[in-house]
């Protein structure tokens, strides 16, 4: 059954739109790695879709353009590890889901009384914490295998535009290919 599920997931990953999102997501992460090295104290975030990605932060347009160019060049040169980022939402979702399941399992059969549930709380916290620790490498693996791609292929940057959003700066990186 696991082999069937894995095969189905692999088929979905080959879908054109999903593949574009994964390649854009990889370029977004690589760009954040480059920007993070150049601007180490600046908080940055990103979001990808099939048409490109967003970079959020107070970097200037020149910094973003240079980082995108370097990131794409380095991915094409084989630095696929740049496509995986420790602060990716994939890691947070993986950790949250697994910790929630672990805590729920700890509470299974605890009874309806508040006292019975409170007595299980240390077990729930322990299991959730152990799961969070083990979820980190799993989240990175899921990124590498399913939610990002370190192989940009024919992906190319069409435009980079600054779009102020309230109190922060947003940059839209539009891609094709």
Image (spheres, rainbow, N blue to C red):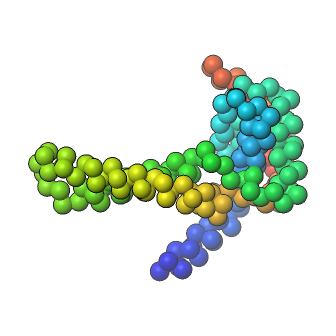
104 is higher (above) or lower (below) than 89: below
- Whole-percent x and y of residue 158? 85, 42
Left or right: 174 in relation to 22? right
Left or right: 34 in relation to 49? right
Taking the image as drawn, is residue 24 in sight? no
- Whole-percent x and y of residue 3? 54, 80
Q: Which residue is drawn at 25% across and 48% down?
A: 121
Q: Nearer the viewer, residue 167 or 160?
A: 167
- Whole-percent x and y of residue 144? 66, 60
Taking the image as drawn, is residue 115 in sight? yes
Q: Nearer the viewer, residue 171 or 34?
A: 34
Q: How many marks?
A: 0
52 is higher (above) or lower (below) than 106: above
Q: Which residue is drawn at 28% across and 58% down?
A: 106
Q: Image quadrant of residue 147?
A: bottom right
Q: Which of 129 and 156 is in front in this view?
A: 129
Q: Image quadrant of residue 75?
A: bottom right
Q: Quadrant of the C terminus?
A: bottom right
Q: Residue at x 79, y 31 (%)?
A: 161
Q: Which residue is drawn at 28% across and 54% down?
A: 123
- Whole-percent x and y of residue 81? 74, 56
Residue furthest to the top in view is 167
Q: Image quadrant of residue 151?
A: bottom right
């Amino acid at each position: 059954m696991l082999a069937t599920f894995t095969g189905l997931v692999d088929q979905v990953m080959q879908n054109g739109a999903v593949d574009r999102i994964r390649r854009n997501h990889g370029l977004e992460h690589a760009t954040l790695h480059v920007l993070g090295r150049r601007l180490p104290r600046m908080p940055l975030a990103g979001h990808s879709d099939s048409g490109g990605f967003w970079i959020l932060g107070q970097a200037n347009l020149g910094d973003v353009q240079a980082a995108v160019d370097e990131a794409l060049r380095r991915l094409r040169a084989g630095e696929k590890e740049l496509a995986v980022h420790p602060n990716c939402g994939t890691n947070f979702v993986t950790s949250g889901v697994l910790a929630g399941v672990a805590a729920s399992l700890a509470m299974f059969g605890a009874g309806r009384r508040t006292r019975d549930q409170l007595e299980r709380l240390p077990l729930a916290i322990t299991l959730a914490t152990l799961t969070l620790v083990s979820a980190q490498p799993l989240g990175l693996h899921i990124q590498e295998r399913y939610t990002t791609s370190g192989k940009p292929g024919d992906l190319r940057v069409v435009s980079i535009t600054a779009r102020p959003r309230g109190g922060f700066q947003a940059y839209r990186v539009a891609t094709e290919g």
